């Protein structure tokens, strides 16, 4: 088991880690697309005399999307770091809470960057 994820209401482990990782990647891509394509609409609403409700909803939506985008991007990079080091979330939490210097140690299951990626995504990682 890697960890329990309340967002998918399931434990993430060896059999479904790939699908969890793809969920995080696709979520980050979707949120970034929303943020960057919505910028033009927000600028137009601010520069013109748009109704208050339209301006408020656009600004609120953009702010919320930026906040979620930052969180999901940090979450994605954290899980990429864990994947490249071949460490589960629980192992990382146990090592960092017990002694902070252990975060630099390499997992005994680490087989190299490419093979760590293949352990998560399968023998052909670019095929998803």
Image (spheres, rainbow, N blue to C red):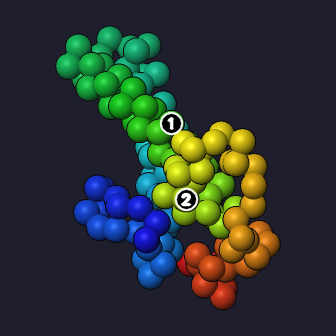
Q: Where in the figure is residue 33, as x and y percent of width and height?
A: 49, 47
Disc 2 is placed on an element classified as helix
Residue position for label 1: 70
Q: In which quarter of the image is the N terminus?
A: bottom left
Q: Is residue 21 above or below residue 122?
A: above
Hey, which quadrant is residue 8 in on the image?
bottom left
Is residue 96 depicted above or below 2 in this figure? above
Q: Whole-percent x and y of residue 66?
A: 45, 32
Q: Which is more N-terminal, label 2 or label 1?
A: 1
Which quarter of the rendering shows the C terminus?
A: bottom right
Residue at the limit of the structure toward the right, as seen here: 112
Outermost residue toward the left? 53
Q: Nearer the viewer, residue 117 or 67?
A: 117
Q: Few, some or many C-alpha atoms within 10 Å of disc 2 (few <14, some 14-19, many ≥20)?
A: some
The label on residue 91 is 2
Residue 99 falls left or right of residue 9: right
> What residue is rendered at 65% in x and 67% in y?
86
Q: Residue at x 34, y 59 (%)?
A: 5
Q: Quadrant of residue 49?
A: top left
Name the image quarter holding residue 11: bottom left
- Residue at screen point 75% across, 61% down: 106
């Amino acid at each position: 088991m890697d960890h329990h994820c309340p967002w998918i209401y399931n434990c993430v482990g060896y059999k479904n880690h790939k699908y969890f990782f793809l969920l995080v990647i696709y979520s980050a891509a979707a949120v970034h697309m929303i943020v960057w394509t919505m910028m033009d609409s927000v600028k137009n609403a601010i520069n013109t005399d748009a109704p208050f409700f339209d301006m408020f909803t656009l600004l609120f939506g953009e702010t919320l999307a930026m906040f979620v985008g930052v969180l999901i991007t940090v979450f994605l990079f954290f899980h990429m770091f864990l994947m490249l080091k071949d460490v589960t979330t629980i192992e990382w939490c146990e090592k960092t809470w017990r002694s902070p210097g252990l975060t630099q140690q390499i997992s005994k299951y680490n087989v190299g960057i490419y093979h760590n990626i293949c352990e998560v995504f399968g023998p052909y990682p670019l095929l998803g």
